[in-house]
């Protein structure tokens, strides 16, 4: 089928051409469609059966430009191919943490999937002070499973290399290379600064040789280190959750990259939330300490669950391949030393990318609403300053920071609980 | 054209079907063909015009098994596709250091190229004590140019990623993964030990946790670090040279991997030659010191030329892309710090792979004739012991060894000049 852009009134006709969707949506005669996309890239339609609203799905279609900018910014619609392939792989590895895919079309650049209508996008809820009991544990599990099972520690040598080739995702990687790992560290026209943020804090990033050299190293790692299939955009806006479930969505940035990239993005986004919530809880007339304490606990939990589950999977699948190197074996203990150094390197990479992420969310084009949504520019500038300071410390200090507890300690030192 | 295996008597018929080869070979009526392949993998034919021996070429064809073992060891003949693509790329980047390609066929898995009949395979000549005045400088240049121009420091983001996908070389990488980076470090049936080598020297590799953990790290780097297009089999048997020229041949192992892999293989092979020449020069009734001193100088020269030329190319092409990160710029000095750390990491990787290479040439299946050709098993065992000791020190110490001079010092300490 040749590609065409859907609109609300064309969605039902498209669905009528996919008979197997009736098992999800029931009769096609009473479908209602509403466009709800508020992201930067795609169009997202809710499809509901008016006679039985439990029969529902999401249809997401990529268009050949960046939606938030318009047709002036072309972006290949073929990015949907990566989203479809990654969704299917992630769903296979983490069935309870990824929406069900009912139908997908590479030609039409669209996917029809589970409507998470009992779940909310996590970022907005966390901004409002809501806690998700399972969130950190589920994210740790998602990271451990998706990253372990797509790495050379599990896949056979052939499959891994073929997967690397399949997920060469040129255009979306370029967005990260530019907007996360380059422009924020330079006086780029694409940056956006809070006018109340003193220039010396910006200069302390963009003119600090150690920060810039470290950012260059993280960028080079991003471009060369094909370790595992990443989600690639693993932040609070890519999670939908409620009290009992967590779902990870929107993996169109998926590619084979450094394991620490996904892990680091979670850490940075939780720390940005932590920073923002001193002002936000006080503005809501609340004591900020309990919620901020919870956010720091989540930061630690994500890492701890990821690390322990990753190591458990490694042990569990020790016969999978390369047992000589990567197995739990009796005797000479080299594998334990190797594993310890391996996890240490992932922590280092994670903190490097977390640092870049915090800096880019402060100086770069795309902000996080946690901080950018604070209308009091002076209060926002204090958050910006803290984000830059923590980001720099994680980035430059990534090889010497020895544990996630130390990361939490840095966050508390720069942004005190009070 | 459907694939078929050539033999001496079929080569002329094949060539007659490629009219453009007449510009190289002259009339097709007086061609003589001789099979001369002594490698492990392929068949190699010299084609000469009997009426004018200056009209000559080499035809190299891959067969669907490992030649040195036979049809019991299948190996996809499509490996020739990688050799052809790599030869063309290397020739483009280093026209004076790579044979001219006259004709290539992916379908027939063959290449017709320049006959280097005024050149000798370097390994055999070095074993015999011959010096090549240009060798180290030419190898350093080949390394600098091929590795710089195929890296993210030069290629645009799209081309680099597309090249990575094109050079996914599953089967030949697997040979390296197994025979260089796994089996020698284990009690594998594929290993071959000099019977005069005391078991404790073998155990000092295969049962040393630090050596094994380090080897695992190098293997993981080999499998994940897609930095540049490697030759992939860069040892003394892959160079043909004379007094005035050096050619690099046989790049069928080419893939995008860690820059240090090619660099390290040169270092290890020169050091293995250095070790072997104490016995060999003495056995030839010569003072070994001058030739061994020359070999150490070549080791240093390869690195020094590689490093200075790589940095020069980086400076020269500073506007190529990502000038914000990788350029020589005035002012804040971060790029100088980045470049220094970048080259330090390449040295570390090079020494790690050099160490693995020295160990595998001693304990693994494929030896170097420099040492394995020594018939006195006790004398050979002393070389083996030295190779293992230097290999271990480079591998385990790779992050702390600060310069190529220190590498030469280690070689002299373990294998004294005398």
Image: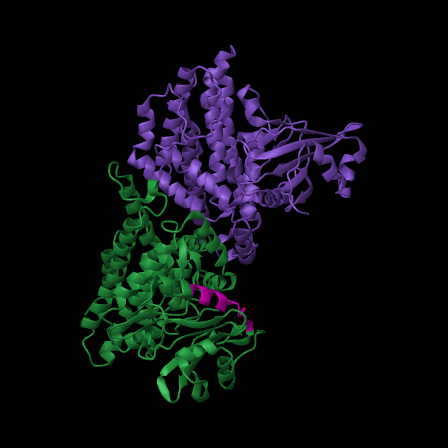
Chain colours: A green, B purple
Comparing A64 with A160, the one in front is A160
The percent coordinates of residue A256 (x first, y second) are: 44, 56
Taking B24 as reference, is B290 left or right? Answer: left
Q: Residue drawn 31% across and 79% down?
A: A118
Q: Is residue B113 above or below residue A291?
A: above
The answer to whether one can see residue A401 in this image is: no
Q: Residue drawn 47% across and 30% down?
A: B366
- For residue A135: magenta? no
The answer to whether one can see residue A78 in this image is: yes
Quadrant in which residue B34 is drawn: top right
Magenta stretch bounds: A73-86
The percent coordinates of residue B157 (x first, y second) are: 53, 57
Comparing B195 with B138, the one in front is B195
Q: Is residue B13 above or below residue B408?
A: below
The percent coordinates of residue B357 (x first, y second) are: 44, 33
Taking A235 as reference, is B26 left or right? Answer: right
Comparing B404 with B44, the one in front is B44
Quadrant in which residue B20 is drawn: top right
The percent coordinates of residue B333 (x first, y second) are: 45, 51
Quadrant in which residue B32 is drawn: top right
Q: Is residue B142 above or below residue B153?
A: above
């Amino acid at each position: 089928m040749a590609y065409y852009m859907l609109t609300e009134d064309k969605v039902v006709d498209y669905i009528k051409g996919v008979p197997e969707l009736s098992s999800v949506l029931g009769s096609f005669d009473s479908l209602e469609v509403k466009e709800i996309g508020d992201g930067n890239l795609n169009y997202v339609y809710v499809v509901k059966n008016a006679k039985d609203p439990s029969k529902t799905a999401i249809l997401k279609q990529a268009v050949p430009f960046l939606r938030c900018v318009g047709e002036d910014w072309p972006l290949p619609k073929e990015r949907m191919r990566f989203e479809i392939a990654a969704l299917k792989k992630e769903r296979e590895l983490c069935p309870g943490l990824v929406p069900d895919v009912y139908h997908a079309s590479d030609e039409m650049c669209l996917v029809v999937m589970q409507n998470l209508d009992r779940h909310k996008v996590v970022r907005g809820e966390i901004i409002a002070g809501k806690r998700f009991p399972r969130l950190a544990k589920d994210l740790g599990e998602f990271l451990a499973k998706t990253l372990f099972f797509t790495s050379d520690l599990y896949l056979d040598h052939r499959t891994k290399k073929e997967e690397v080739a399949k997920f060469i995702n040129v255009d979306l990687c370029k967005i990260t290379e530019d907007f996360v790992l380059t422009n924020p560290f330079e006086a780029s026209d694409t940056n956006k600064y809070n006018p109340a943020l003193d220039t010396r804090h910006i200069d302390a990033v963009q003119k600090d040789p150690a920060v810039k050299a470290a950012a260059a190293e993280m960028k080079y790692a991003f471009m060369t280190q094909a370790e595992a299939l990443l989600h690639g955009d693993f932040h609070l806006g890519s999670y939908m959750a409620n009290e009992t479930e967590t779902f990870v969505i929107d993996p169109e940035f998926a590619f084979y990259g450094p394991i620490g990239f996904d892990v680091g993005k979670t850490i940075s986004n939780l720390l940005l939330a932590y920073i923002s919530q001193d002002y936000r809880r006080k503005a809501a007339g609340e004591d900020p300490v309990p919620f901020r304490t919870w956010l720091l606990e989540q930061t630690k939990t994500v890492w701890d669950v990821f690390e322990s589950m990753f190591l458990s999977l490694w042990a569990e699948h020790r016969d999978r391949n390369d047992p000589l190197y990567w197995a739990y074996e009796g005797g000479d203990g080299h594998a334990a030393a190797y594993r310890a150094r391996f996890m240490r390197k992932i922590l280092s990479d994670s903190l490097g990318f977390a640092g870049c992420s915090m800096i880019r969310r402060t100086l770069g084009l795309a902000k996080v609403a946690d901080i950018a949504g604070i209308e009091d520019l002076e209060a926002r500038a204090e958050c910006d300053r803290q984000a830059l300071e923590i980001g720099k410390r994680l980035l430059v200090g990534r090889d010497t920071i020895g544990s996630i507890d130390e990361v939490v300690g840095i966050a508390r030192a720069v942004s005190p609980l009070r």
